[in-house]
Each structure stands twice: as C-alpha cells, then as structure tokens.
Image (tube, rainbow, N blue to C red):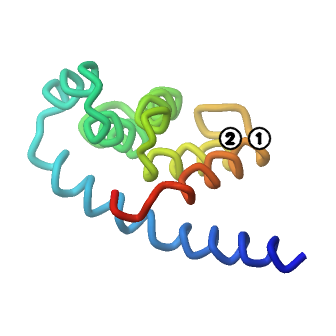
Amino acid sequence: MRQRHVVIRWLATLAMILPLAGLVCHGAASAQTPPDLTRQRADQGDTIAQFNLGLMYNDGERVPQDFGQAAAWYRQAADQGFARAQYNLGVMYDNGEGVPQDPAEAVAWWRRAADVPLAE
C-alpha cells in the first residue's frame, strides 16, 4: 500500500512539473519556427519537432485545432521515449481528446514518462 502512495505522489509531482517544462520547450522552438518547417523536421523523426507539432495542434496555434493530430504527433515522440510527449498523451487519454477515453492507458503513459531520467 505504501508503494502505491509513493507512486501516486510521484505522478502528482510529475503532473505539476512537466506542463511547465513543455511550455518552456514549446515557447522556445515553435514560436520562432514556421509550421511547415516544424512538420518537415517532425517527418524526419525529430522528437522535439513532433512534440511541438502536437502542441500546435492541441492548442490550435498556427494550425487548426485537431486533437487527433495532436495525439498522433505526441505518440510519435512518445514512442521515441520523449517524456513530455508521453505525459501529454496520457492527459489526452485521460480526457478522451483525440483518442478514446481510457484512464488505464493514461496511467500507463504517465508511468512511462515517470521512468524517463530527468536529464532529458
């Protein structure tokens, strides 16, 4: 039971920290990069570009808002081990935005994000 409380506390801390890190990353890269260049980099496998494109679609920033596209781009970055994309994908599963609502899948993505070393 104690281990469960530690995991829940850790996930709550992660839930507060990662959105702030995502905003810093997003603000630095996508505010200066045209969507076409971001998409080109994302198509070439650049995880930060994939994550930023996911943010753009999620927020409707310089592209039409499309939660399905946001989830698809987050998943590409998440599958490469990018913790912020894993966290955001978990949020999308938790809210049922762009993917079917699935709390168990959300927790699975959050756990993957929590397992990534903080040096990322």
Using the image, determine if residue 103 lies above or below residue 38: below
Q: Earlier in the sequence, mark 2 or mark 1?
A: 2
Percent coordinates x, y for residue 24 in the rendering: 26, 63
Q: Residues within 10 Å of mark 2 (few under 14, many from 20)?
A: some
> Do the residues bearing badges 2 and 1 touch, measured as CB atoms within 8 Å?
yes
Residue at the image position 56 percent from the left and 56 percent from the top = 115
**Pointer 2 residue:** 96
**Pointer 1 residue:** 102
In front of the other: 52 or 62: 52
Marks 2 and 1, how far apart at CA: 7 Å
Q: On the picture, is 49 further left or further right than 37? A: right
Residue at the image position 44 percent from the left and 29 percent from the top = 76
Amino acid type for the residue under numbered disc 1: Asp
In front of the other: 10 or 57: 10
Q: On the picture, is 22 further left or further right than 12? A: left
Amino acid type for the residue under numbered disc 2: Gly
Using the image, determine if residue 110 lies above or below residue 99: below
Residue at the image position 62 percent from the left and 54 percent from the top = 110
The quadrant of the rendering that contains the C terminus is bottom left
